[in-house]
Amino acid sequence: MSASLDVVINGQPRSVAVGTTVSGLLGELGLGERRVAVERNREIVPRAQHATTTLAEGDRLELVTFVGGG
Amino acid sequence: MTDTWKLGDRVLRSRIIVGTGKYASLDETRAALAASGAEIVTVALRRIDLASKQPTVLDAVDRAKYILLPNTAGCYTADEAIRTLHLARELGMDDLVKLEVIGDPKTLFPDNTATVEAARRLVKEGFKVLPYCSDDLITCKRLEEAGCLAVMPLAAPIGSGLGIRNPHNIRLIIDNVGIPVIVDAGVGTASDAAIAMELGCVAVLMNTGIAGARKPVLMAEAMRLAVEGGRKAYLAGRMPRRDYANASSPVGGLIE
């Protein structure tokens, strides 16, 4: 069994496999096709770097999108 | 006669900007946007719902038809507002942003000082900023100096539907700033929108005034017509007010 890391996604704790990338995480969450902006430890991860950015222990991620609003 | 207005280098025909919040369904959102005739629509930015695979507001907003105006609703500091807009930029938007920095949860009145600070920083970063602010001329002047494309003073508290509480202040702002004035917040029904336009606002921004109506799509149409009517009345120039009557029919030639 591969080792895992503890991260926090939108305020919720989650375990992911060591080596998981942002793209991998979005795929795992079923968000691969959705328009999502990603912040990791308060720094934006540009879409072009989703595939090359690997998550680390304790990372805090914000996954956001547009919703209805005034 | 084509009666367009400019927002930066954009030329717009519609003078109504509408929000996308509080609708019963995305179908209703879509129908209300169409009935309003809006070219610009606002959206908010939130954490994505990881539990739901439901379509989102972007499925209701045809990007080929509408300019997306992300807002910073719910932000209480300049830093939060700027962080939110960085995320909006990453999500993919047009270059316009609706800046709101809230000062108090009960009234949702803006923190004008923080709004001016955020506006300065965002303009330096290249954002085209439309700030929600109090109906206060000096704040509007500071926002103009900061490089905002327009100012958006409130007519009444957000979502209150109380109409134009201080038409005199709105008029003073219109007369004393050189950028478009858009009334944002407080419009409750068609006559409120018409009043804003008769005062000389270039446009009106609303959400709950439409979404909170019993029949939102019909109200969206009413708002479109009211904005058009108010604008035409402004261009036509209203008659002077008189304290006493002035007969419309000839006063001479009466039968005896």
Image: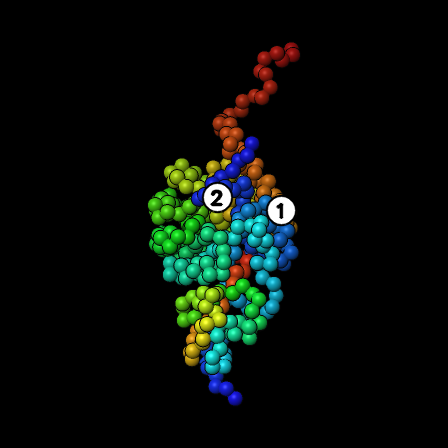
Q: Residue at x 43, y 66 (%)?
A: A44
Please tell me which residue lies in front, A29 or B210.
A29
Question: Label 2: chain?
Answer: B
Q: Residue at x 38, y 40 (%)?
A: B177
Q: Residues within 10 Å of mark 2 (few under 14, many from 20)?
A: few
The image shows residue B250 at horizontal and vertical percentages of: 59, 16
Residue A42 visible to the viewer: yes
Quick check: B196 left or right of B210?
Answer: left
Q: Nearer the viewer, mark 2 or mark 1?
A: 2
**Res. B35 mark:** 1
Dot 2 and dot 1 within a common chain: yes
Q: Quadrant of the C terminus of chain B?
A: top right
Amino acid type of the residue tagged 2 in the rendering: Arg
Q: CA distance from mark 2 to mark 1?
A: 22 Å
The image shows residue A23 at horizontal and vertical percentages of: 51, 71
Quick check: B242 left or right of B215?
Answer: left
Q: Residue at x 56, y 53 (%)?
A: B63
The kind of secondary structure element at disc 1 is helix
The image shows residue B35 at horizontal and vertical percentages of: 62, 46
**Res. B10 mark:** 2
Residue B159 visible to the viewer: no
How is the rendered protein coloured?
A: rainbow
The kind of secondary structure element at disc 2 is strand
Amino acid type of the residue tagged 1 in the rendering: Ala
Question: Label 1: chain?
Answer: B
Quick check: A6 left or right of B256?
Answer: left
Q: Residue at x 50, y 29 (%)?
A: B237
Please tell me which residue lies in front, B62 or B53.
B62
Answer above or below: position of B175 versus A34. above
Please tell me which residue lies in front, B62 or B181.
B62
